[in-house]
Image (tube, rainbow, N blue to C red):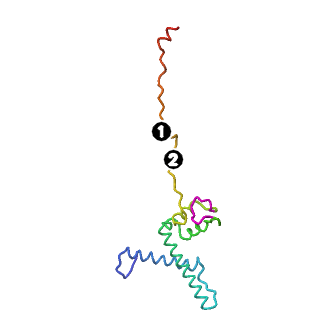
Amino acid sequence: MFESDQDLDPRIAYLCYEERWLLELVFKRYKHDECLNKTEVQGDFSLLGLEFINFISTVLTCRMLKKAREAGLLEKVSYGELLEDLSSAWRMVDAPEDPATDDKHWVHTLNYVFEELEALGLSRAVPKTKPRKRGRLRKDPKESKPKRPRSRPRKSNQSADLL
């Protein structure tokens, strides 16, 4: 139930609430997860610099949330779980700049983390091969050999005369 003094279409009201909830998530991230609620600075210049850095980190958080939502990852896991998964993806120092899932320069990365990296465009996906059918492969009809007769060879009259 949603009660308001505004004459809005229910879809518009829902979208406004959804954007409001995004702001709440950003402020939660700003205060708790990024630990940006303490200043511990002495001068005005330091405070301005700190708030500028906090603003940049909040903008980056919003962009990361938007990218994760567009990739459809927030339907499967929460934002915090997604960040934990992505923080477990380590690459070697001498790895090439263009990361691919199968380039063997990842350190202890799980398969579902690779799927998240690919969905976000942070790793090139490996082309998946079609699963093969079980059993023997069919013979190529072009290489067919002459068929042998199915029945027993018949005894001819000549062999009967020799006995």
Gap in Å between the C-alphas at discs 2 and 1? Answer: 17 Å
Please name whichever residue, 7 or 98, is drawn nearer the observer in this view of the structure: 98
- Tag on residue 140? 1
Q: For the stretch drawn in magenta, what is the main secondary structure?
A: loop
Residue receiving disc 2: 132
User: Which residue occupies 54% across, 82% down?
Assistant: 55
Measured as percent of width and height from the top left, residue 134 is found at 52, 43
Q: In the visual, does 66 lie left or right of 98?
A: left
User: Which residue occupies 58% across, 78% down?
Assistant: 32
Q: Amino acid at mark 2?
A: Arg
Measured as percent of width and height from the top left, residue 40 is found at 64, 86
Measured as percent of width and height from the top left, residue 75 is found at 49, 66
Q: Amino acid at mark 1?
A: Asp
Q: Which residues are magenta?
A: 95-106
Residue 44 to residue 37: above or below: below
In the rendered image, the residue lying farthest to the bottom is 44
The label nearer to you, 2 versus 1, is: 1
User: Which residue occupies 57% across, 80% down?
Assistant: 31
Residue 134 to residue 119: above or below: above
Residue 146 to residue 52: above or below: above
In the rendered image, the residue lying farthest to the right is 93
